[in-house]
Image (cartoon, rainbow, N blue to C red):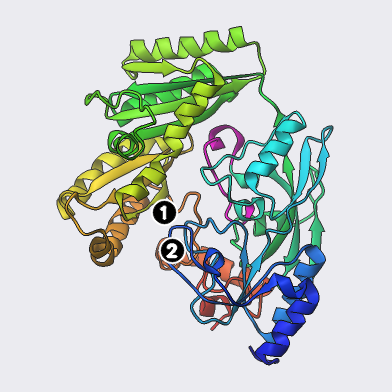
Amino acid sequence: MTHAAPADFLASLQAIVGPTHVLTGGDLASYEQDWRKRARGKALAVVRPANTAEVAAVVKACAAAGVTLVPQGGNTSMAVGAIPDSSGQQVVLSLTRLNAIREIDGANLTMTVEAGCVLQVLQEAADKAGYLFPLSLAAEGSCTIGGNLATNAGGTQVVRYGNARELCLGLEVVTAQGEVWSGLSGLRKDNTGYDLRDLFVGSEGTLGIITAATVKLYPRPAVQLTAWAAVPSFDAAVELLGLAHQHLGSGLTGFEVMGRFALSLVDKHMPQLRVPFIDNPEVPYSVLLENSDNESEEHARSRFEALLETAFEAGCVSDAVVAESLAQAHELWHIRESISLAQAEEGLNIKHDISVPVSRIPAFCAETDVLLQQRLPGVRLVNFGHLGDGNLHYNVQVPVDGDPKAFLREREEEVNTLVYDQVEKFGGSFSAEHGIGELKVHKLEKHKSPVALGMMRAIKGALDPQGLMNPGRVLRAQAAQGH
């Protein structure tokens, strides 16, 4: 803080948003502790503006005082990207009060929403209006659309609809200088220079603060078909994906792969969920696939059944369960989305959010599995994720009798280095949908090209020359400011 005493600065914030929305005491854990409980910071204050004008005024006040800002939505970051550092000198800017749905434009198939709108609320509003907003994540009851866009979130339907970036047509952003850029037009064609929207999507709050967005809507599907298939190998899962593309075309909405050990954790910690084929040791992987379309159910079902029949004949599916109702489909998806929680119940683990070209995933897994077992005998691999778009959550669980805290403390960097070097070898990315945050800054410096890093630092320096916006995330704070 360079220009004002803390008391004067806090008083200026209170004058903007009201005294009750500047939090400096009490239990601030929900704002200061990260989603995975791996880190805890300390905020100078948590500020909760009610609208874009208040966000802009808070940013101006922070800029004048030289106080750095940490934008926060639902605080569901998987990469320590949304909590303050331990200095007690940063302002957490919580956007949860900016939660209005401003407009649904049916003719344009768009919805304009504020950044603090919880993803599930947005989905339900679209559904109530007769449309689909397809972004779907395990944290959708807590995460906010601003955070989804700031991290370019992925989820389970990317294979058909793309990441958050592809679902966004326009943004409203408060710049690091406290100015408001209003780019909320719902245009699908706007070829007027640099795409500023794409700068802010995926920037993790380091360039400006997203306060609202115009997103795409889709017609609500008339039919949805879901199957859980047992596959004999990872190669078979990739073969099944190819068949699904051929038979279902754009109707293929989701294609998830789950390793046997990942599913065994769900079976162990959530016995009320009935995991298909878990009692059959000859099923090393399962696939959850979904087809949704606007054709007749009879036609869609015949194509779906033809896919499964072809897969059985090809030997890439050994058994399958087809949901007979939407309720059964939700049960199958609930099993898939419970893997992360079951893994947490099993104990601390080392998470990897990676992407590899689909064609190379089986070889990547086979080779990396062996290397990890050679280096760290007894480690258990929780391998699951969005095979349809090449994104795996390739996680490492401590050996059965190991001390999780000691294992993470002593071996996490070694494990990460091995896995990320393998990802690079196979032409992949070490961060597919979780972002960089603070957790992976040093990995970005290792795996991103110097040319790309140079351009990123130039952008950061141009848009946020004071280095006020979420410093130390994505890029090192000193590098971002040109030091």
Residue stretch rendered in magenta on the structure:
149-162
- Badge 2 vs badge 1, beta-carbon distance below 8 Å: yes
**Considering only vertical position in the picture, is 34 above or below 363?**
below
Circle 2 Cα neighbour tier, 10 Å, few/some/many (<14 / 14–19 / ≥20): some
**Considering only vertical position in the picture, is 52 above or below 360?**
below
Q: Nearer the viewer, residue 417 or 156?
A: 156
Rounded to the nearest angstrom, the CA distance separating label 2 from label 1 is 9 Å
> Which x, y percent locates residue 281?
22, 26
Q: Nearer the viewer, residue 349 or 373?
A: 349
Is residue 158 covered in magenta? yes
Residue under pointer 1: 430
Q: Tell me, for residue 440, which label it has, or none.
A: 2
Asked whether, in this view, residue 320 is left or right of residue 30, the answer is left
Residue for point 41% across, 68% down: 442
Is residue 174 covered in magenta? no
- Secondary structure under tag 2 reads loop
> Which x, y percent locates residue 128?
74, 32
Determine the residue located farthest toward the front in the rendered image. Answer: 26
> Which x, y percent locates residue 117?
69, 50
Mark 1 belongs to which amino acid? Phe
**Considering only vertical position in the picture, is 120 above or below 192?**
above
**Considering only vertical position in the picture, is 123 above or below 118?**
above
> Which x, y percent locates residue 482?
56, 80
Q: Which is nearer the N-term, disc 2 or disc 1? A: 1
Residue for point 71% across, 70% down: 21
